[in-house]
Amino acid sequence: MSSTDTITMWTGQTSVVMDEIKRTGRYMVKKEYVNHKYGESAWIFQEAYQYLAVKAENMIERPKGAESPVWVYREAGQIFGGKDVHYLKLCIPADKLILFDSRKWNRILNLNYIGKDEKDEETFEQRMRSRGIHDMLKIFSTGYYPMEKREIKKSWDRLFGDTNIEEAYIQGMTWEICEEWII
């Protein structure tokens, strides 16, 4: 892809974000926003987001001040809407975007293992149950399972590199929303 290639994606943002874009010409997520939005369960999101942030930094340039990903979707219907959500159609430079399968990302958000296939996931879950682990959150919320935690986090690398994602499951991240990207 050349640096002029773009990909059309959608995002849902609040009026606060829209005001920031109007005021500065761009928007970047701060970790404090994630903590505020998710409260008690923010640590789960921070675990997943931190993993993605570290990997993404090696794939696309992170602008100074960007702390967490901005979520984008192939179709507007994939956005979790609600009160005060503005749907934005974006034309994002391809070199500022990472695409992945939303089903795999949801496994990461739930701090679950991503298998090579369903059978691999089933085998992993059976192995965990045989060790008395029935809730994957325990692996991340206690210090008792460092090897299992490492294995799960290593499996998350399967989020990347899949070029054959069904259209309905294409999700992505970018570090910012630039005003000129809004269609």
Image (tube, rainbow, N blue to C red):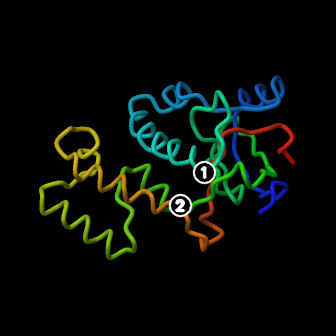
Q: Secondary structure at mark 1?
A: loop
Give me the C-alpha separation between circle 2 and circle 1.
Answer: 10 Å
Residue under the point 75% across and 45% down? 87
Tell which tag, 2 or 1, sits nearer the viewer.
1
In the depicted structure, whether residue 162 falls above or below residue 49: below
Tell whether 145 sits left or right of 62.
left
Q: Which residue is mark 2?
A: 160
Q: Secondary structure at mark 2?
A: loop
Relative to 156, is 131 on the left or the right? Answer: left
Q: Which label sits on residue 59?
A: 1
Q: Who's the residue at 47% across and 55% down the image? A: 106
Question: Which badge, 2 or 1, comes first in the chain's sequence?
Answer: 1
Name which residue type carries label 1. Met
Q: Residue 104 at x, y = what percent? A: 48, 61
Residue at point 36%, 56% (across, down): 154
Give the x, y percent position of residue 38.
47, 33
Residue 63: % across, % down: 68, 34
Picture quadrant of residue 165: bottom right
Q: Which mark is residue 115?
A: none
| Closer to the camera in the image, 83 or 80 | 80
